[in-house]
Image (cartoon, grey):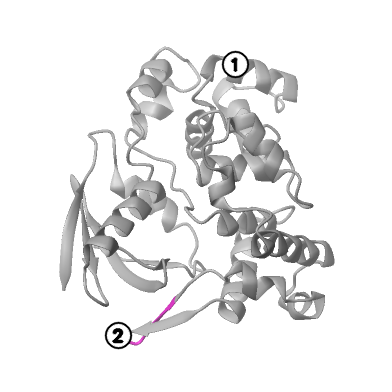
């Protein structure tokens, strides 16, 4: 088995990231164990199954194929994006140390990172799947969606899946998704999104490197992508520090709990609180979510 290691910064806690990835038994795109996590991804035209483990450094074990320089480079990039390894969190922790709202939670969960979704189509589709339903039903929908339209590899009797490719989804119709308990609106949004990717109207490459406001505007041109979904994807796929879903109920509940408020804050109150976190809104969001 071919292996290599990836160094990680001091402010990186793999266990906390694994806790996030273990949050649903219905998760179908990776398998967590006591050792670490196993995942199937596509690199160029190659399907790669790998296991990730370790603490101070991450150990990558390639479970299929040969470890070429191109494969190693692709895996390093993917894992770096997945766990936001290259972001220097020292300025965020310095900010949190002086902030009554974040101080305790940032200290308690030191090293927790944004566990991202390097695939933009998956990130946006997952956000759409989760709109207006509870988290566990969103995982149920994702499981059915992936099992029906994603690619599968069997390894040591276990099934591993890739998220459906936009081209495979763009040809679907309501009659393919409604039996999976998609709402008619959710079905149309997912197919419209896939069509945008399949046609080249939208891609990760077209968004990467744009200023935050412009990137958000480009995403919101697609029907079904509102402010919450756009900010979620910009946070999860590109790690824009400014991204935060203002309307998110989790943020509001976390602020209410941490400040001992009798009712949830208004949007204006949330905006005022987040002014202190300029440039680090995404990580403030992450740690507020974690406080719940």
Magenta stretch, main secondary structure, is strand
Residue 96 got which mark?
none
- Residue 73 in percent (x, y) is at 28, 56
Q: Which mark is residue 275?
A: 1
Q: What is the tally of numbered marks visible in this picture?
A: 2
**Circle 2 Cα neighbour tier, 10 Å, few/some/many (<14 / 14–19 / ≥20):** few
Mark toward the start of the polypeptide (2 vs 1):
2
Q: Which residues are magenta?
A: 156-160
Q: Quadrant of residue 122?
A: bottom right
Task: Please identify the quarter of the rendering in which residue 275 is found.
Answer: top right
Q: Residue at x 65, y 15 (%)?
A: 272
Residue at (40, 23) in percent of width and height:
92
Residue located beneath label 2 in the image: 156
In the rendered image, the quadrant that contains the N terminus is bottom left
Secondary structure of residue under mark 1: helix
Residue toward you, 67 or 58: 67
Q: Is residue 62 left or right of residue 247?
A: left
- Residue 167 vertical position relative to residue 14 in the rendered view, above or below: below
Comparing 182 with 151, the one in front is: 151
Q: Position of residue 65 (x, y in %)?
A: 25, 77
Disc 1 packing (10 Å; few <14; some 14–19; many ≥20): few
Does dot 2 land on a helix, a strand or a loop?
A: loop
Residue 131 in the image: above or below residue 104? below
Q: Residue at x 23, y 42 (%)?
A: 8
In this view of the protein, can residue 266 be seen by the observer? no
Q: Do callouts 2 and 1 mark residues in contact (Cβ within 8 Å)?
A: no
Residue 20 image position (x, y, % from top left): 43, 51
Q: CA distance from mark 2 to mark 1?
A: 50 Å
């Amino acid at each position: 088995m071919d292996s290599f290691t990836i160094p990680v910064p001091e402010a990186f806690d793999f266990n906390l990231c694994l806790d996030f990835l273990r949050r649903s038994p219905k998760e179908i795109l990776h398998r967590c164990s006591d050792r670490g996590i196993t995942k199937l991804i596509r690199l160029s035209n190659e399907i790669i199954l790998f296991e990730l483990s370790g603490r101070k450094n991450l150990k990558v074990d390639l479970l299929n194929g040969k470890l070429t320089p191109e494969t190693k480079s692709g895996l390093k990039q993917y894992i770096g994006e997945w766990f936001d390894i290259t972001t220097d969190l020292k300025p965020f922790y310095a900010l949190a140390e002086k902030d009554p709202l974040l101080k305790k939670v940032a200290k308690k969960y030191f090293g927790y990172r944004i566990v991202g979704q390097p695939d933009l189509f998956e990130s946006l589709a997952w956000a759409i799947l989760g709109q207006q339903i509870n988290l566990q039903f969103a995982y149920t929908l994702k499981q059915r969606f992936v099992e029906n339209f994603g690619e599968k590899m069997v390894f040591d009797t276990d099934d591993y899946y890739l998220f459906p490719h936009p081209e495979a989804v763009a040809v679907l119709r309501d009659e393919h998704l409604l039996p999976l308990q998609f709402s008619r609106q959710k079905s149309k949004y997912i197919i419209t999104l896939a069509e945008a990717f399949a046609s080249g109207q939208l891609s990760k490459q077209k968004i990467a490197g744009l200023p935050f406001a412009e990137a958000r505007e480009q995403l919101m041109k697609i029907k079904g992508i509102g402010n919450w979904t756009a900010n979620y994807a910009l946070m999860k796929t590109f790690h824009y520090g400014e991204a935060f879903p203002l309307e998110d109920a989790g943020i509001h509940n976390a602020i209410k709990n941490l400040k001992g408020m009798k009712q949830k804050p208004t949007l204006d109150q949330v905006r005022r609180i987040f002014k202190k976190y300029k440039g680090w809104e995404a990580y403030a969001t992450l740690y507020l979510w974690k406080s719940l």
